[in-house]
Image (tube, rainbow, N blue to C red):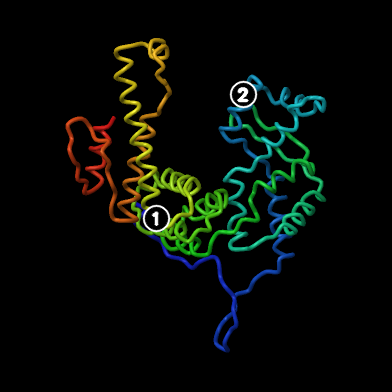
Amino acid sequence: MLAARCRSHCDDQVVGVASSHEVIPYQMKPENKNKQVAQKIIEILQSGLTLNADTLHYIDSTFSNPSIGELDELLQDESSCETDSLLELLFFPDESVQMQLEEMLGGTRLQKEDEQEIQEVVCNKALQTHLRFPDERGALQVKVTPSNVAPFIMRLNLLRCLNPKLSASIAEFVPAAFQTRCRVRLRNAKPITSQNKILFLQAFFEKLEIDDDEFWDYLDFVLGFLDGCKDGPDMYEALMARKRFYFQSLQKAKNLDIQLKKHNVETLLLRGKRVSYIDAADARKKIKMIDRTSLAVFGKTEFFDLMPPGAQSITLKGKKDIDNLIKELG
């Protein structure tokens, strides 16, 4: 359970004026850090990149399940308008690549000129990499060029730095096995700078007790929620507004099902009805996530007049009541 917290020191340390008894933590000079990061990127490229499932699906769907030889021919065809975009896709770093760099980056604040220096160091090294397919097709050897390196490094999001308060919360409340990936997820998300959003996410890490295998679903949902809401003062109201949207989606889906039992789609369209697909299962899942998050962070959650037929009011006291309500709506 996520409740089994592990405690460690915050990665981000602030150096100030030291007394005679204080120990100032050693901080590597930026130029040394740049060389270290560049060397690690070189090592990653030299060891090869494994295509993830999404990339493989796109390649197979777009190019009809190409063999290694067919893919190599396509990449060698300079007249093809698809070559550059395909190379960018093949050199897109995934989380497994970023996790190899995250511990090294820590709370380092790199600037644009640092990223440029890292890129130059990597480009000055004559490199070849292997693009490994996660199936029986094997690996494709590809030369690493500046045109490949530039977008690869940019997508590592090296210039983003995790807020020290969030870094401390992750170190204290997130299981040790999840911490590096958690920092990568935040590095890839839109920067969280609002005080209210920072406090909300800190409380999320501290108070929400969920099974380990659900953690990433909840974290992705919360990061998406924070990205989509304004920097207003009331995060609870923003969360309830998102819940209201999903409730309304469920009602629309239910009403559409009732109408489709009486009329076909063509008839509804002729009558001017809007027929749009609503993922009811996803909406129910999101409502459940909102309620569990809200109860953990704020100690409460709200319900609206969008109730099941015949229901006047509903009082929820915990997860079991939430699950029962979701069943009623679906």
12 over 224 or under it: above or below? below
Q: Residue 284 carries which label?
A: none
Indicate the quadrant where residue 139 lies.
top right
Q: In this view, does 235 lie to the left or right of 67?
A: left
4 over 72 or under it: above or below? below
Label 1 sits on a secondary structure element that is: loop
* Residue bearing the label numbered 2: 60
Q: Residue at x 41, y 47 (%)?
A: 215
Label 2 sits on a secondary structure element that is: helix
20 over 257 or under it: above or below? below
Between 138 and 205, which is closer to the camera in this rendering?
205
Amino acid under disc 1 = Asp
Task: Give the x, y percent position of residue 237.
Answer: 37, 50
Q: Which residue is drawn at 23% across and 37% down?
A: 324
Q: Is residue 93 left or right of residue 206?
A: right
Can you say which quadrant of the picture contains the C terminus? top left
User: Between disc 1 and disc 2, whose residue precedes?
Assistant: 2
Q: In this view, does 111 lie to the left or right of 267?
A: right
Amino acid under disc 2 = Asp
> What is the spatial separation of the Cα atoms under label 1 and label 2, in whole angstroms?
46 Å
* Residue bearing the label numbered 1: 234
Task: Give the x, y percent position of residue 6.
Answer: 41, 61
Find the residue positioned furthest to the bottom: 20
Q: Nearer the viewer, mark 1 or mark 2?
A: 1
Task: Give the x, y percent position of residue 134.
Answer: 59, 32
Label 1 Cα crowd, 10 Å radius (few <14 / some 14-19 / many 20+)? few
